[in-house]
Image (tube, rainbow, N blue to C red):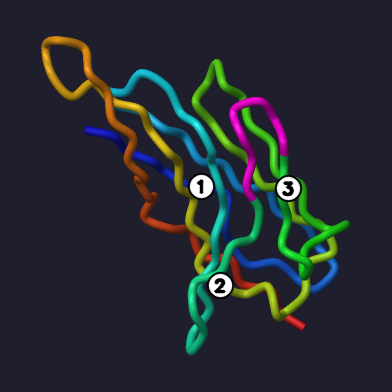
Amino acid sequence: QVQLVESGGGLVQAGGSLRLSCVASGDFKSINNMGWYRHAPGEQRELVASITSGGTTNYADFVKGRFTISRDNAKNTVYLQMNSLEPEDTAVYYCNGQFRRVANVEGATYERVYWGQGTQVTVSS
């Protein structure tokens, strides 16, 4: 199996910063893209940022210049540095990853997306 565990969420005042971490563990050969999503009450889950295994990043327009995604491939960990937080950033933040796993004894592989359980970020005004 594959597990993703997020940490680093909490309560912060507007203008403050938080750093989220997401550690992957389990039985897999490699991780391709990793990303952070968020889900606010009454809203749909939305992409915040993503990063390829090579380090190419992509950001939602609403976080450009404020958030930075990074990853440590040796530690199977993805980070989200969040600065200049606004009350509108309040949400549950989830990480995900595209994992390549072995399918059978012949060595065939497949790719599947796994999600973490989420971490709450609350920004007070």
Q: Is residue 17 left or right of residue 109?
A: right
Upstream in sequence: badge 2 or badge 1: 1
Q: Nearer the viewer, mark 3 or mark 1?
A: 3
Residue found at the very far bottom of the displayed protein? 42
> Which residue does the image show at 36% across and 55% down from the upper left?
117
Residue 4, quarter of picture: top left
Q: Nearer the viewer, mark 2 or mark 1?
A: 2
Q: Is residue 26 above or below residue 79?
A: above
Mark 2 / mark 3, whichever is N-terminal: 3
Image location of residue 110, percent across then percent down:
28, 30
Q: Which amino acid type corresponds to the residue marked 2 in the rendered image?
A: Ala
Q: Is residue 67 magenta?
A: no
Q: Secondary structure at mark 1?
A: strand
Residue 94, image x, y percentages = 48, 57
Instruction: Find residue 88 and report its image quarter.
Output: bottom right
Specify the quadrant of the image occupied by residue 89: bottom right
Determine which residue is flagged by label 3: 81
Q: Which residue is mark 1?
A: 7
Image vertical order of residue 56 relative to residue 87, above or below: above
Of all residues shown, which one is farthest toward the left?
Answer: 105
Q: 27 and 86: which one is in front?
A: 27
Q: Circle 2 sits on which residue?
A: 91
| Local crowd size for mark 1, using a 10 Å CA cut-off: few (<14), some (14–19), many (≥20) | some
Q: Quadrant of the N terminus?
A: top left
- Kind of residue indicated by mark 1: Ser
Q: Which residues are magenta?
A: 50-56
The amino acid sitting under disc 3 is Gln
Alpha-carbon distance for marks 3 and 1?
A: 12 Å
Find residue 28 and report its horizontal and vertical position in percent.
32, 23
